């Protein structure tokens, strides 16, 4: 086997043709990882925002009414499912409750209704312990809208377990002291 001439070796090391292709081959996987990571972050952030927006809108719709029923709440839950689009509504759970603070300063559930998924309706007279302090005074009530959304990544190879987003919104009834539910 013959050795290449010294001039050929020198020319080989000085030849820069194809260097850009080699550099791109090194950088491309990192750029693609950054791109897909950014896409994934944006999708997760958008799902979180929509879940929060759904909790807010559902509570707001109930807080605007004088009274409600299970049929009215089913329609409100359907609106909540539409707000989550383009994300699937299957992993979305919605609960609406009326919370009233009694004369002793204990916040209790007056009525509660859910869309029968992950969140279950709270029982009547259940004590609410996570109410922010100073939100309502004794004898006042508010509407509590809650959502839970299980976000599953489209890139399941990277993020293998679903991420759970939970949001709660407290709103005062607008036209009455307490929104009644006839058959909750």
Image (cartoon, helix red, strand yellow):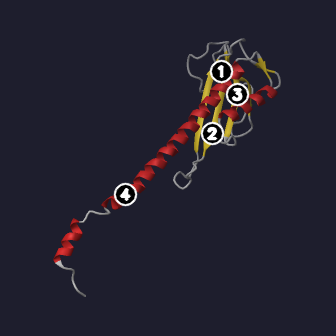
| Nearer-N-terminus badge (3/1) | 3
Nearest the eye: 10 or 116: 10
Q: Disc 1 marks which residue?
A: 107
User: In the figure, residue 29 lies in which quadrant?
Assistant: bottom left
Q: Which mark is residue 149?
A: 2
Distance from disc 3 to disc 2, alpha carbons, whole Å, reads: 15 Å
Dot 4 falls on a residue whose secondary structure is helix
Given the current orientation, which residue lies at the most extreme bottom position? 1
The reply to whether discs 4 and 3 touch (Cβ–Cβ < 8 Å) is no
Distance from disc 3 to disc 1, alpha carbons, whole Å, reads: 15 Å
78, above or below 102, in the image: below
Distance from disc 4 to disc 3, alpha carbons, whole Å, reads: 54 Å
| Nearer-N-terminus badge (2/1) | 1
11, above or below 66, in the image: below
Distance from disc 2 to disc 1, alpha carbons, whole Å, reads: 26 Å
What's the residue at 21%, 65% (across, down)? 14
| Nearer-N-terminus badge (2/4) | 4
Dot 1 falls on a residue whose secondary structure is strand
Q: Which mark is residue 96?
A: 3
**Residue 174 can be seen in this image:** yes
Dot 3 falls on a residue whose secondary structure is strand
Q: Depth-wise, is mark 3 or mark 1 nearer the camera?
A: 3
| Nearer-N-terminus badge (4/3) | 4
Given the current orientation, which residue lies at the most extreme left position? 6
């Amino acid at each position: 086997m013959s050795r290449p001439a010294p001039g050929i070796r020198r020319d080989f090391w000085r030849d820069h043709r194809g260097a850009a292709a080699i550099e791109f081959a090194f950088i491309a996987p990192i750029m693609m990882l950054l791109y897909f990571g950014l896409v994934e972050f944006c999708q997760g952030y958008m799902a979180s925002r929509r879940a929060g927006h759904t909790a807010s809108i559902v509570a707001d719709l109930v807080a605007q009414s004088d009274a409600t029923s299970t049929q009215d709440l089913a329609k409100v839950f359907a609106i909540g499912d539409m707000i989550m689009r383009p994300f699937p509504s299957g992993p979305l759970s919605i609960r609406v409750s009326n919370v009233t603070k009694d004369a002793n300063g204990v916040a209790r559930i007056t009525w509660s209704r859910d869309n029968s998924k992950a969140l279950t309706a709270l029982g009547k007279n259940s004590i609410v312990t996570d109410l922010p302090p100073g939100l309502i005074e004794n004898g006042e009530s508010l509407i509590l809208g809650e959502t839970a959304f299980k976000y599953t990544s489209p890139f399941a190879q990277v993020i293998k377990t679903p991420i759970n987003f939970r949001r709660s919104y407290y709103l005062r009834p607008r036209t009455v002291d307490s929104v009644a539910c006839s058959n909750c």
